[in-house]
Image: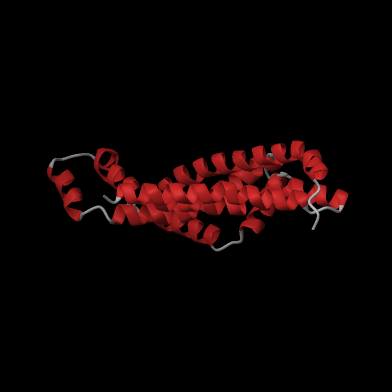
Amino acid sequence: MNWDWNVVGDFMPRFWDGIQVTLQALLFGSLIAFSLGLLWAIAQRSPSAWIRWPVTAITEFIRNTPLLVQLFSLFYVVPEWGPSMSPLTTGVIGLGLHYSTYTAEVYRAGIDAVPVGQWEACTALNLSRGRTWQAVVLPQAIRRVVPALGNYVIAMLKDSPMIAIIGALDMLGEARAYSDETFTTEALTLVGVAFIAIAYPASLLIRALERRLVR
């Protein structure tokens, strides 16, 4: 294949628009996934079955439903009963909600790894439940699970092109649209290289962080 740099130059403005959408979806989707996942994990350890069971049912349903179906539902079905959202906002919420069910399992594993003696010590010191979580349990649990959470950020990056289905043109969405218009492949190749350029250094950073945290 002959590489046409003129095509690349013509595509670059759309590429930068697409990469901004990709990074916004990744950043805000990750924030939702991390914060909501922590809430799911804590709720699943609630002493009240009225909290545990519904939360478990919701997370299992989301985890076992395809992300693509969830995006379509949020974009086309939810507005029938509530406010409509922009494609990017819908994509961010969809990615964050979907991955929050996976980060919840990561948090749960980290919480379960906190020694029972830590809980017993908090009880002996008469610490409140909220103080126990805030000062003792969560600092230890989150430190253990940071590398695993980072892996899900990379997974979310690789799933982010799905938001183009509902009209949020990320890098791949822009490349596909451009390639369909010009019958060229340079844009798709450039986007593939961009995904590697983002994901591979991020994976190396996560490995280094994991080695540092397990010392």
The answer to which of 164 and 43 lies nearer the viewer is 164
Q: Quadrant of the N terminus?
A: bottom right
Residue 159, image x, y percentages? 61, 54
The answer to which of 83 and 104 lies nearer the viewer is 104
Residue 144 visible in the displayed image: no
Q: Quadrant of residue 66?
A: bottom right
Q: Residue at x 82, y 51 (%)?
A: 179
Residue 188, image x, y percentages? 74, 52
**Residue 61 falls left or right of residue 35:** right
Q: Residue at x 64, y 46 (%)?
A: 91
**Residue 67 vertical position relative to residue 39 in the rendered view, above or below:** below
**Residue 174 falls left or right of residue 57:** right
Residue lying furthest right: 182
Residue lying furthest front: 2
The answer to which of 176 and 183 lies nearer the viewer is 183
Q: Quadrant of residue 65?
A: bottom right
**Residue 61 vertical position relative to residue 20 in the rendered view, above or below:** below
Q: Residue at x 15, y 40 (%)?
A: 126
**Residue 171 vertical position relative to residue 65 in the rendered view, above or below:** above
Residue 124, image x, y percentages? 12, 45
How many marks can you see?
0
**Residue 90 falls left or right of residue 56:** right
Residue 117 visible in the displayed image: yes
Residue 100, image x, y percentages? 49, 50
Residue lying furthest bottom: 64
Q: How are the colours assigned in the image?
A: secondary structure
